[in-house]
Image (cartoon, rainbow, N blue to C red):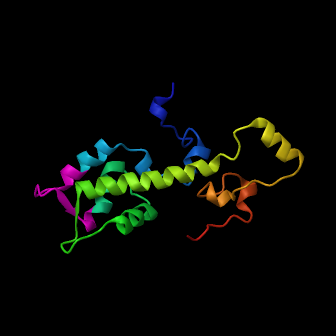
């Protein structure tokens, strides 16, 4: 019995959880974000302040969001003079960030053919992408030696 995927052993697939694209925005649906947005909009104006974005993400996830997620949202918002974020702007930013992170997730798959992978291993041809382009943190102890985080 899986107990709804919750175990003391961590996520079911640690390699998938360590991908660069593994962010909370890819886990929760637009409807869940919208429900939280409506709750945060106490005055009924259809907008929240930029300061409430972190609280919105925290309430939607149920845990504190990563600093990089908050930064991605804040740099994509076009804040007008009153510093408000409308639902339409939040939703378009959410979809844009999801599209960007989904492109990054394609980096994790180097091969689509076993024959090509076997030929490259036989000829000692290196992988085309760096491990830092695939994962946020090292996945094995041997990857930990020399692992660095790339600056953007």
**Above or below, 140 relative to 76:** above
Horizontally, is 145 left or right of 95 in the view? right
Look at 18% across and 59% down and name the residue there. 47
Q: Quadrant of residue 58?
A: bottom left
Q: Horizontal placement of 101 versus 29: left or right?
A: right
**In this rendering, does residue 22 appear at all?**
no
Query: In the picture, which quadrant includes the C terminus?
Result: bottom right
| Above or below: residue 75 compared with residue 10 | below
Q: Residue reaching furthest top?
A: 1
Magenta residues span 37-52
Q: Is residue 98 above or below residue 54?
A: above
Question: In the image shown, does 116 or 58 lie closer to the viewer?
Answer: 116
Mark yes or no: residue 127 visible: yes
Residue 6 point in image, percent of width and height: 48, 37
View extreme (right): residue: 123
Residue placed at 53% from the left, 52% from the top? Answer: 103
User: In the image, is residue 86 above or below residue 9?
Assistant: below
In percent of width and height, residue 18 lies at: 58, 51
Q: Quadrant of residue 118?
A: top right
Asked if the magenta segment contains residue 132, the reply would be no
Image coordinates of residue 82 in percent, x first then y, are 18, 72
Where residue 21 sits in the image (x, y, percent)? 52, 52
Q: Is residue 106 left or right of residue 127?
A: left
102 sits left or right of 13 in the view: left
Tag count in the figure?
A: 0
Seen from the viewer's position, the closer of residues 113 and 29 is 113
Residue depicted at 12% across the width and 58% down the height:
45
């Amino acid at each position: 019995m899986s107990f709804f995927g919750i175990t003391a052993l961590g996520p079911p697939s640690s390699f998938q959880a360590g991908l660069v694209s593994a962010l909370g925005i890819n886990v929760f649906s637009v409807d869940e974000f919208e429900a939280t947005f409506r709750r945060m909009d106490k005055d009924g104006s259809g907008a929240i302040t930029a300061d409430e974005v972190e609280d919105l993400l925290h309430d939607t996830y149920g845990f504190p969001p990563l600093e990089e997620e908050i930064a991605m949202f804040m740099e994509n918002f076009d804040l007008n003079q009153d510093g408000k974020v409308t639902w339409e702007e939040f939703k378009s930013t959410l979809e844009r960030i999801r599209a960007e992170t989904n492109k990054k997730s394609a980096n994790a798959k180097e091969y689509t053919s076993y024959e090509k992978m076997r030929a490259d291993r036989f000829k000692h041809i290196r992988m085309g992408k760096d491990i830092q382009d695939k994962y946020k943190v090292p996945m094995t102890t041997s990857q930990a030696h020399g692992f660095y985080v790339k600056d953007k």
